[in-house]
Image (cartoon, rainbow, N blue to C red):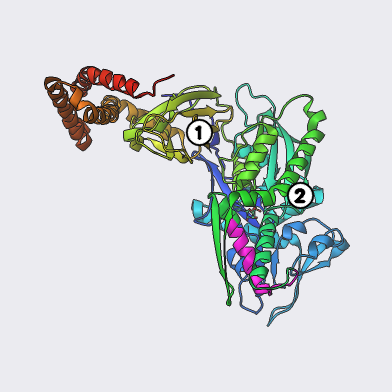
């Protein structure tokens, strides 16, 4: 029926291999199938990389959320951040071990080991970091098996770009201990790029250079890599051109900056000296409130806190501007580090420019971070995927390729379905038609149909049917903060751009006010080839009916605008017009209004051609009214001296 589009058939592999992001704080497992990559596990699919060892005989090992929740109750039996110890000697890991609640000791040949003290009926245990990681991996494996309904025995696991041989080897061992054959270890930034389809094999593919900017809770990693298309069993090769970052900079520092402000104000409120210390419980509460304020400010313009301090209540509204001013120096440090890393990669790049910037890590949800990255590197960074999931998703893409996904079958890069926005009345205005080759770009002007709108909603759809309800919604966003204007006056420029990797950027700019907003999505994700075929069949089946409906909807919207305009003018100028003309106009208004009312109840009840005629007749008849109105408004203009 149609050629398979890239990103669809590509992911159908013969063998089941999962992708795992084995993180310092959280871990995730994903699979890539006919629908593209997806995270496995119900609800909060993230598994905290935390393991608690039994305190008494008969108790079970606790892994994940439960272990994290009660970590403060069992500090010496709860092992977290074990990734920092993987493949390292106790001496090398000493700096990190200082921050851990459990004991790190030297084992054979000085290797870092975790010592869990004896409990009731349980002997002391000295564990390798591999064993602890294996407990996390076993949990992920069983989650994947539950979600897929079948056994899972092979995995691709991601590791930081800076992991050395010993650290990589330790990760392999952890996999084996968990009953998983580690088919491949993939650097985290490479996985992030793959999740966006960068470097995937395709016709005429050229090497691609990317920057991956990863800002988490406690660390910042930046890498510049090159992905080169390969052949056969090796779909591509990757090469890290430069890595950099700051191992002690992240979202937690944003929290601390906010906590500092709150602490100063709380002390002042309580009448205490600025250098006084607060009790630990209050300090902990402030840090938690600070993180909540930060997260809220990623979506809202302001966030309020209210903390009951017993004798007083601390109430405060933080604005996004204030937060941005506070964290800006830290964000600038990441930008500088990223620029330095790019500079280091210059020689290897040999004049070539990076073609994409990928954002990873929870802290890249901060709008200031996105804006500064966009400004500093002159391109829209990739943000369509959840920044916490992108590494696991990419690992699953690599897994599906290693599992024999049919990457060679791809002939050309075309968009499988049309893309557009919902307009008044629920119809879809298509901006990019299906089968367009990528990259593709389209631009169209829109306006409002209601007076005084200060916010315009844009809903983005994919599909072939005429009505939004019959298409697949990709997302929505608002252009807000507009000054109130009459209907039809705002000029909204909407741009759709699909890049070579199939990532869609939609942006909308209101020209008069300069207000802008946008959205990024990967239209092919979640869509299989068989679904595309079903959508095509249905659109053919409904083609005629859909066209009629779209026409009726447009006539309703435009007809209502005419009625509104004529009604207003007629009320104002009735006295200047002869009765016969007013009578004719009113009867035409009544007949169009009747058709619109009927069409709004059931679009099938009207004949669109008759409705079109009624609208045209009214437009013609209203010419005189229009002339009178214009003459009048000219007269009302102040006379010039
Ligand atoms: P990660 O280490 O990648 O899991 O990132 C965790 C960091 O991301 C923490 O500092 C979180 O507070 C931060 N974070 C998560 N969601 C948001 C958000 N919506 N806005 C700002 N920061 C966030």
Magenta span: helix, strand or loop, mainly? helix
Residues drawn in magenta:
275-293
State the residue at coordinates (81%, 51%): 166
Q: Position of residue 313 (x, y in %)?
A: 56, 71
The residue closer to the viewer here, 462 or 406, is 462
Residue 281 sits inside the magenta stretch: yes
Asked whether 213 falls inside the magenta stretch, the response is no
Residue 356 horizontal/vertical position (percent): 65, 33
What residue is rendered at 67% in x and 40% in y? 372
Crowding at label 1, few (<14), some or many (≥20) Cα neighbours within 10 Å? few
Q: Can you name the residue that lies furthest to the bottom here? A: 120
Q: Which residue is mark 1?
A: 513
**Residue mark closest to the camera, 1 vs 2:** 1
Element marked by disc 2: helix
Marks 1/2 in contact by CB < 8 Å: the verdict is no
At a point 67% along the width and 69% down the height, the residue shown is 268
Residue plotted at (68% across, 82% down) = 121
Task: Please determine whether, in this image, residue 296 is positioned above or below residue 587.
Answer: below
Note whether 411 is above or below 111 in the view shown. above
Q: Is 632 on the left or on the right of 255, as rendered?
A: left
Foreground pick, 511 / 359: 511
């Amino acid at each position: 029926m149609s050629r398979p589009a890239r990103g669809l058939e590509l992911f159908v592999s013969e063998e089941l291999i999962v992708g795992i992001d084995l993180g310092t704080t959280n871990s995730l497992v994903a699979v890539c199938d006919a629908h593209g990559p997806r995270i496995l596990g119900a609800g909060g699919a993230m598994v905290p990389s935390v393991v608690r060892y039994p305190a008494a005989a008969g108790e079970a090992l606790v892994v994940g959320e439960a272990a994290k929740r009660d970590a403060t109750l069992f500090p010496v039996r709860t092992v977290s951040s074990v990734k920092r110890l993987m493949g390292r000697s106790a001496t090398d890991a000493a700096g990190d071990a200082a921050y851990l609640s459990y004991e790190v000791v030297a084992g054979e040949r000085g290797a870092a080991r975790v010592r869990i003290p004896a409990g009731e009926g349980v002997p002391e245990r000295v564990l390798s970091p591999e064993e602890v990681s294996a407990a996390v991996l076993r949990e992920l494996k069983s989650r994947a098996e539950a979600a897929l309904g079948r056994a899972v025995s092979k995995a691709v696991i991601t590791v930081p770009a800076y992991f050395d041989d010993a650290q990589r080897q330790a990760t392999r061992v952890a996999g084996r201990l968990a009953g998983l054959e580690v088919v491949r270890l993939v650097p985290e930034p490479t996985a992030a790029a793959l999740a966006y389809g960068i470097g995937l094999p395709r016709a005429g593919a050229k090497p691609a250079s990317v920057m991956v900017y990863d800002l988490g809770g406690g660390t910042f990693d930046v890498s510049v890599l090159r992905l080169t298309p390969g052949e056969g069993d090796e779909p591509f090769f990757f090469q890290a051109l430069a890595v950099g970052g700051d191992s002690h900079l992240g979202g937690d520092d944003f929290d601390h900056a906010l906590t500092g402000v709150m602490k100063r104000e709380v002390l002042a409120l309580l009448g205490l000296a600025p250098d006084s210390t607060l009790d630990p419980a209050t300090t902990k509460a402030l840090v938690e409130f600070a993180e909540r304020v930060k997260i809220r400010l990623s979506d809202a313009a302001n966030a309020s806190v209210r903390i009951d301090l017993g004798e007083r209540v601390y109430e405060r509204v933080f604005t996004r501007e204030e937060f941005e001013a506070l964290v800006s120096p830290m964000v600038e440090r990441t930008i500088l580090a990223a620029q330095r890393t790019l500079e280091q990669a210059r020689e290897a790049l040999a004049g070539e420019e990076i073609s994409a910037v990928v954002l990873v890590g929870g802290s890249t949800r901060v709008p200031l971070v996105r804006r500064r990255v966009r400004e500093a590197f002159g391109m829209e960074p990739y943000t369509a995927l959840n920044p916490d999931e992108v590494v696991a998703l990419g690992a699953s893409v690599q897994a599906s390729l290693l599992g024999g996904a049919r990457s060679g079958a791809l002939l050309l890069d075309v968009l499988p379905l049309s893309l557009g926005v919902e307009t008044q009345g629920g119809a879809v205005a298509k901006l990019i038609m299906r089968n367009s080759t990528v990259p593709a770009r389209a631009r169209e002007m829109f306006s409002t149909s209601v007076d005084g709108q200060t916010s315009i909603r844009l809903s983005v759809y994919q599909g072939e049917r005429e009505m939004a309800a019959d298409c697949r919604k990709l997302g929505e966003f608002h252009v807000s903060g507009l000054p109130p204007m009459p209907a039809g006056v705002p000029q909204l420029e909407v741009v759709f751009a699909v890049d070579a990797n199939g990532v869609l950027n939609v942006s909308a700019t209101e020209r008069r006010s300069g207000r802008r907003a946008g959205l990024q999505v990967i239209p092919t994700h979640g869509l299989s080839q068989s679904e595309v075929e079903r959508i095509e069949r249905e659109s053919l089946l409904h083609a005629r009916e859909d066209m009629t409906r779209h026409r009726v909807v447009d006539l309703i919207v435009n007809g209502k605008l005419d009625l509104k305009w004529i009604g207003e003018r007629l009320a104002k100028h009735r006295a200047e017009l002869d009765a016969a003309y007013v009578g004719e106009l009113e009867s035409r208004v009544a007949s169009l209004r009747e058709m619109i009312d009927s069409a709004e109840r059931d679009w099938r009840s009207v004949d669109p051609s008759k409705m079109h005629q009624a609208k045209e007749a009214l437009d013609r008849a209203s010419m005189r009214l229009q002339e009178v109105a214009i003459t009048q408004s000219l007269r009302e203009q102040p006379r010039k001296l």
